[in-house]
Amino acid sequence: MEDNKKKQIPTNTITRDVKNLAEPTGNIYESVVVLYKRANQIALAEKKELNKKLEDFKQERDTMEETFENKEQIEISKYYERQPKPDLVAISEFENGELYFRKAKKDD
């Protein structure tokens, strides 16, 4: 997800023309499915990366009362909170032609 820093992706929602989103696939519903699948891939990758980084801080504790957080753990969490949302990243990639998608072949 480090490459998301390099791209200029807005961190808030933008009103978009539905016709422009439908152009690459020819159908707005197909475009939405492509965007959904890509956003899901991005979200899963970010979650896996975050969990890997936070695993270093995991300690075996019996109760929730004994759990504490340190500054590094908080900073890592804040970094991921500031990142653009997966759906905004997917839309940006889709609009810039950076996504590869194809339709499944129909069996006759």
Image (cartoon, grey):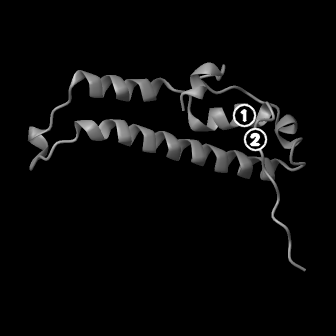
Please provide percent x and percent y for residue 33.
72, 52
Give the number of the disc on residue 99: 2
Q: Is residue 35 shown left or right of residue 29?
A: left
Q: Which residue is drawn at 59% across and 47% down?
A: 41
* The one of 14 and 33 positioned closer to us in this rendering: 33
Mark 1 = which residue?
93
The secondary structure type at the circle numbered 2 is loop
State which tag comes first along the sequence, 2 or 1: 1
> Looking at the picture, which amino acid does disc 1 mark?
Glu
Q: Quadrant of residue 80?
A: top left
Q: Do the residues labelled 2 and 1 touch (CB within 8 Å)?
A: yes
| Mark 2 → mark 1, Cα distance in angstroms | 6 Å
Give the number of the disc on residue 55: none
The local crowd at label 2, few if under 14, some if 14 to 19, many if 20 or more residues have their Cα within 10 Å, is: some
* The one of 8 and 20 positioned closer to us in this rendering: 8
Q: Quadrant of residue 90?
A: top right
